[in-house]
Amino acid sequence: MNDKQLRRNQKGGVSYAKWGYLFIAPFFLAYFIFTFAPQLLTIYNSFFENYREGLKQVGPNFVGFGNYVKLFTPDKTGTINILKYTGNTLALWLLGAVPQILIALLLAIFFTSYRLNIKGQQFFKTVIYMPNLIMASAFSMLFFTLFSNVGPVNQLIQAWGWSDVPIDFFAYKGTVRGLISTMNFLMWFGNTTILLMAGIMGIDQDLFEAANLDGASSVQTFFRVTLPLLMPILVYTVITAMIGGLQMFDVPQVLTKGKGMPDRTSMTLVMYLNNYLGGSKNYGMSGAISVIIFIVTGILSLFVYRSLNRKD
């Protein structure tokens, strides 16, 4: 068949490309209306002074980078709040995400191992995923009740003679951050395990058999076969966990009653943002904080992506 006949047949055939564009059009339309346009509006609002003071509405007045300057201006105690809360957020995320990824990876390898051939996998998958179905606010209220001064944990400590007086778990930075990180770990490690299990099950089993025939140990098989081929799913998991961690709000908000106690050491960026969106409706400052969160998220996502996708 010559080129002219081929082009004639192609013209007379059915083009399915337009149907593909038609099917994905609703997603892009919804994204533009509900995500992209609000993002542009947020950036626009960050350059304006626009808030409510009592019954008086101030602005909108164009102030340029004035809102950003205020965010990075030290307060009366010499603390730059935006940096303090960024550090709090990253610390809380790392304390919960690192054990979450490691334990989820170990469980995924454990459940997908053909050598072990674990029975009742569906039951275990359901059990480890169940905490993810509980609302974060309910989880926080549960932990607040358990670790309050009159809660079951303090009652057990006093009954066993470990302490004569109740321990105020919410008065120490370490215990509050530990509780928040523990809740985030319990809520999300099951979801992470399922994702990593799906990634491992998608790897060709012939590669594992070949490694076994070549005398590779389990550790060598993991680092030479499993981990490199699992890296795309692992990168996705780490980045999505990081984005969720930077947007952490409901767990520390409920557990600390929105105060970030003690001494604002558990105050996150979104909690800080929510303070400006509360009574004063300060759209300018909240917009500036949102832009900073977006920039920090983009930089860290790029760093994680490049770090986990190195050629070596």
Image (cartoon, rainbow, N blue to C red):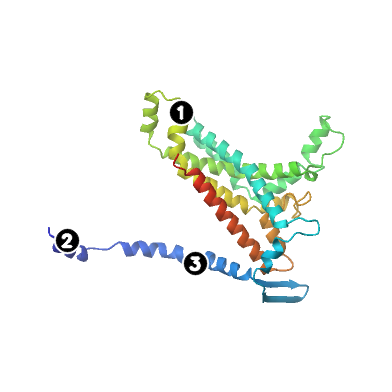
For residue 32, which numbered disc appears in the image? Answer: 3
In terms of secondary structure, where does tag 2 sit?
helix
Residue 66 image point, x, y percent: 68, 69
Q: Quadrant of the N terminus?
A: bottom left
* Dot placed on the residue nearer the N-terminal end, 1 or 2: 2
* Amino acid beneath label 1: Gln
Write the residue at 69% across / 54% down: 83
Judge by depth and name the residue closer to the eye, 93 or 12: 93
Front tag of 3 and 1: 1
Judge by depth and name the residue closer to the eye, 227 or 87: 87
Q: Are marks 1 and 2 in contact (CB under 8 Å)?
A: no
* Amino acid beneath label 2: Leu
Residue 232 image point, x, y percent: 46, 44
The residue wearing badge 1 is 220
Residue 300 image point, x, y percent: 57, 51
For residue 6, which numbered disc appears in the image? Answer: 2
In terms of secondary structure, where does tag 3 sit?
helix
